[in-house]
Amino acid sequence: MGKPHIAVIGAGAFGGWTALYLLRGGARVTLIDAWGPGNSRASSGGETRIIRGAYGPDQPYSKLAARALELWKQHQSQWKQQFFFPTGVLWMVEGDDAFERGSLPSLKDAGIPFEELAVSELSRRWPQINFENVEWGIYEPQSGYLLARASAQAVVERFVSEGGEYREAVVAGGELESGDWKSLTLSDGSALAADRYVFACGPWLGSLFPRVVGPHFVSTRQEVFFFGTPVDDSRYDEGNVPVWADHGDHFMYGIPGNQGRGFKVADDTRGSAFDPTSGERGVSEDGLTAARRYLAYRFPGMKDAPVIESRVCQYENTTDHNFIIDRHPENENVWIVGGGSGHGFKHGPALGEMVAQLVLTDTTADAVYRLARFSHKQ
């Protein structure tokens, strides 16, 4: 028996790592992407992503994040290219703290170091932050941020160097929902036949599988702003302020440094529905005004800081914000992997490792990831 041939469609954080681990597991792998790894229309585009362990109670993601961090460190050491920056992650807790309280046992169980900090201690450590309305905090000293675009590209480069085949093309949809197709039609007119197919297409999954995925899936428009820090004021530089998440009326978050791109500020609140292919990616005046207002409130020394960069990206959300990792119900050779829901990137290597094992051994994913969960909730 020869090697199984597996086609992976999508070269982002989920698809790229899955392809790499399938290759290492003994498969022949063809990886396909429309615009290339880390492109600006992909959910794995942009410069940085947070890696953290707090996820609330009763979920698999804290342990998955811990495993992912091991693999990020392992690969950057092997490849001699830094992707992970251990700046620490600070959670500022306002009002309802069920998420943060529920996260503490999960952090402990996953072996992720953390500290519970009173407001007085928060103010002592980070006097440049205004902790008004903050009641307490969680600090994850060994968490931080990841390089997004650079690592997505590096994974594909390594995939090719280890013997994988990468092609830039678009897969024609339409027939994918049926169980009787034998090959993929590509935009260059060719056909690709494989033994198994893994669709890790991020925000395009809903349109490729409108019946199975579409009703439980939406791509939303998200705005990100980068502000310039004051000259000769290092208080807001990477190393002096951690990655932070502010769980108040809106869930705001930010990353200092960002490879020289400034002080990143974003609102995690889900935006309007967005077409990842043709959607316009200019930020709104309302979004900028809200970001400026928040920055001046929480980081007073950054009041009136200039916007030096901005971008519009998208989340691909499932209705319950859990990932999809499952076979298509009418085609057992087709796997659907996605629904990062704004928190998927960090898990890339651990998820790829897991998906490759499932696909190569014909094993079923945990129930939290399966498509059947949606029918149970109807």
Image (spheres, helix red, strand yellow):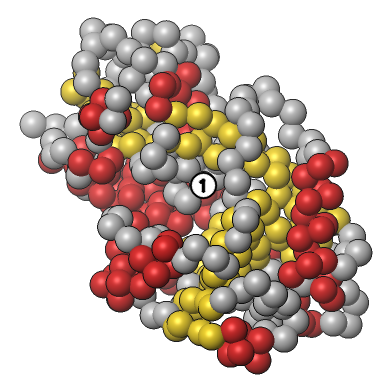
In the rendered image, the vertical position of residue 130 relative to residue 31, given as above or below: below
Q: Residue furthest left?
A: 1
Q: Quadrant of residue 331?
A: top left
| Residue 196 seen by the camera | no
- 155 vs 305, nearest the viewer: 305
- 259 vs 330, nearest the viewer: 330
Name the residue carrying label 1. 342
Image x and y of residue 191, in percent: 39, 13
In the rendered image, the vertical position of residue 1 relative to residue 70, given as above or below: above
Q: Quadrant of residue 322?
A: top left
Residue in the picture at 53% in, 77% down: 137
- 201 vs 29, nearest the viewer: 201
Q: Sort mark 1 into few (<14), some (14-19) or many (20+) by Cα contacts within 10 Å.
A: some
In the rendered image, the vertical position of residue 211 relative to residue 6, given as above or below: above
Q: Secondary structure at mark 1?
A: loop
**Number of residue marks:** 1
Quadrant into which the N terminus falls: top left
Residue in the picture at 19% in, 32% down: 4
Identified by mark 1, the residue type is Gly
| Residue 239 seen by the camera | yes
Image x and y of residue 91, in percent: 54, 70
Residue in the picture at 74% in, 65% down: 263
Image x and y of residue 44, in percent: 54, 45
Image x and y of residue 38, in percent: 58, 44
15 vs 301, left or right, is left
234 vs 251, left or right, is right
Quadrant into which the C terminus falls: top left
Residue in the picture at 47% in, 66% down: 97
